[in-house]
Image (cartoon, rainbow, N blue to C red):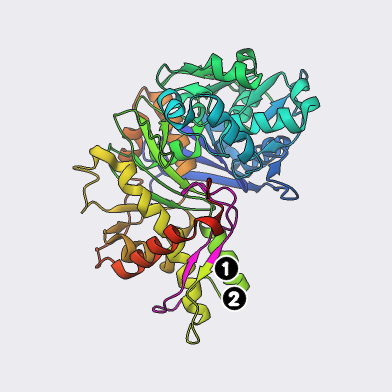
């Protein structure tokens, strides 16, 4: 293998469970060093993490990269979206961060929807109808349930903002991650003062939104990174993954992780009043319409554990239907739901039930895909375009085959396994070299990987899932039922 040509950049992925750091050769896209350190999540009453451990994990993961990290000329941090980080006057966290999958703020979300224009008003203003995962609902929950913590807060950050600020000493964010807060107006590209006034949050507490291609700052002393290295704006994890794939408008992506997502880059600002599609901005100048489910690989693994089976131990056939909404659900909008199993027979096996869990998890993602693609489906998102399958679940045969069977589309699985960190690295490389980050990723061929042809779509299973979901409103806690 040829020696790295340089220059080097660092891409960081600070996720729910761990921080990963990659040192990447800008010329070739080759990963020359990597490191990873875990996080812990307190699930006692919601989903919380101490932001200080993210910083410790970042330092550890960078140290693991060895001498290569000290040659980096630029760095970018991508992080889990929506999390509420509250900082006091000393710059330290007031309390643990409320994570994206903490849905205790569902009642506050319902109230904010009613008080500020309903779904149509929110979609028109922010591009999205907020879910309980959105940051604005978490701030409203904090102000109601922990007013002392809210009063002690002088700065509010998202997870990637927090780490970028620790690197540079300056509070910044980007339009992609900001578009998932609920207080950034996508129609104007600014913070929405009426929303902030309504929830009692000063605009002065929020970070500056750094523009595409703009430098967020430089690295201060205290980490293995070289002092003075450029720091890119960073972004949310979904926006970084889109960069990491070098997506062109309309190319469909299905990501299988703790949460499941479908998204595509678009030139048109989304504004879906049904709330199915979140109208996020991307990390550049376009948009990233996205639908997300709370229950994906973790929920299916939990079903496998309950059945005493390995995750690949599925059996075809059977008439059982399983909606694995173990943590409530975001798509469809069922924050109070629990899992629902229907259609058991004497001949139903554990393998049938496990396959039904896969089917239920994939079903809602595919149902949202057509709305995500919208009118920009052709040519890159047409019905014969391959689904780019990413995330931890993309490695699993059962996940891949379920997606093929229920979508009727060809599937391509990129070989690159760390797309969020690679997207952050592409952003850093674009900043350093004056290039479009998505073009950098395409030059690195990050989306290349094995392709699987389309199979006939399983209409019988899709019909059964549609009928079960449509008939179970009361059991699933559907609003208004």
- The residue shown at (60%, 14%) is 203
Residue bounds of the magenta highlight: 314-340
Quarter where residue 381 is shown = top left
Secondary structure at badge 1 equals helix
Query: Which residue of the protein is positioned furthest toward the left in this rendering?
Result: 379
Q: Residue furthest bottom?
A: 346
Check the image and name the residue furthest to the front: 481
**Residue named by callout 1:** 303
Between 170 and 186, the residue placed more toward the observer is: 186
Q: Nearer the viewer, residue 15 or 86?
A: 86
Residue 104 x %, y %: 66, 42
Is residue 228 visible in the rendered image? The answer is no
Residue 369 falls left or right of residue 90: left
What crowding class fits label 1: few (fewer than 14 Cα within 10 Å), some (14-19), or many (20 or more)?
Answer: many
Of the pair 354 and 71, the residue shown nearer to us: 354
Work out whether 455 lies above or below 35. Answer: below
- The residue pinned by badge 2 equals 307
Q: Does the CB distance between marks 2 and 1 fall below 8 Å?
A: yes
The residue positioned 73% from the left and 22% from the top of the image is 153
Cα–Cα gap, marks 2 and 1? 6 Å
Is residue 1 found inside the magenta-colored segment of the image?
no
Q: Position of residue 89 (x, y in %)?
A: 76, 17
């Amino acid at each position: 293998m040829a020696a790295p040509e340089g220059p080097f950049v660092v891409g960081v992925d600070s996720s729910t469970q761990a921080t990963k750091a990659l040192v990447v050769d800008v010329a070739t896209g080759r990963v020359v060093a990597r490191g990873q350190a875990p996080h812990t999540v307190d699930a006692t009453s919601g989903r919380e993490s101490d932001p200080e451990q993210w910083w410790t994990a970042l330092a550890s993961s960078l140290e693991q990269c060895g001498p290569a990290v000290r040659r980096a000329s630029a760095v970018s941090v991508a992080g889990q979206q929506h999390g509420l980080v509250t900082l006091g006057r000393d710059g330290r966290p007031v309390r643990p961060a409320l994570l994206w999958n903490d849905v205790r703020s569902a009642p506050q979300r319902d109230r904010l929807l009613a008080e500020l224009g309903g779904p149509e008003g929110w979609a028109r203003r922010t591009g999205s109808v907020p879910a309980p995962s959105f940051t604005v609902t978490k701030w409203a929950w904090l102000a109601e349930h922990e007013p002392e913590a809210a009063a002690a807060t002088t700065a509010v950050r998202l997870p990637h903002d927090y780490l970028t600020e620790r690197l540079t000493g300056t509070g910044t964010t980007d339009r992609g991650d900001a578009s998932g807060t609920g207080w950034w107006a996508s129609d104007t590209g600014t913070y929405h003062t009426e929303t902030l006034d309504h929830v009692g949050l000063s605009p002065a507490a929020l970070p500056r939104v750094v523009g595409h291609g703009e430098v967020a700052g430089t690295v201060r002393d205290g980490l293995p990174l070289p002092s003075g290295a450029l720091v890119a704006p960073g972004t949310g994890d979904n926006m970084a993954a889109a960069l990491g794939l070098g997506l062109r408008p309309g190319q469909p992506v299905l990501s299988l992780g703790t949460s499941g997502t479908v998204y595509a880059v678009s030139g048109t600002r989304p504004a879906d009043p049904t709330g199915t599609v979140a109208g996020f901005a991307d990390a550049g100048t376009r948009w990233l319409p996205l639908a997300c489910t709370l229950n994906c690989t973790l929920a299916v693994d939990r079903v496998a554990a309950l059945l005493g089976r390995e995750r690949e131990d599925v059996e075809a056939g059977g008439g059982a239907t399983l909606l694995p909404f173990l943590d409530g659900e975001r798509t469809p909008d069922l924050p109070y739901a629990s899992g629902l199993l229907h259609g058991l027979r004497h001949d139903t096996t554990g393998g049938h039930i496990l396959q039904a869990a896969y089917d239920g998890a994939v079903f809602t993602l595919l149902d949202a895909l057509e709305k995500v693609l919208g009118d920009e489906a052709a040519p890159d998102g047409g019905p014969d375009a391959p689904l780019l399958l990413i995330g931890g679940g993309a490695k699993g045969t059962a996940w891949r085959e379920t997606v093929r069977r229920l979508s009727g589309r060809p599937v391509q699985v990129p070989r690159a396994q760390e797309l969020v960190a690679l997207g952050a690295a592409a952003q850093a490389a674009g900043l350093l070299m004056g290039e479009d980050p998505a073009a950098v990723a395409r030059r690195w061929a990050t989306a290349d990987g094995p392709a699987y042809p389309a199979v006939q779509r399983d209409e019988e299973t899709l019909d059964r899932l549609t009928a079960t979901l449509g008939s179970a409103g009361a059991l699933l806690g559907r609003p208004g039922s």
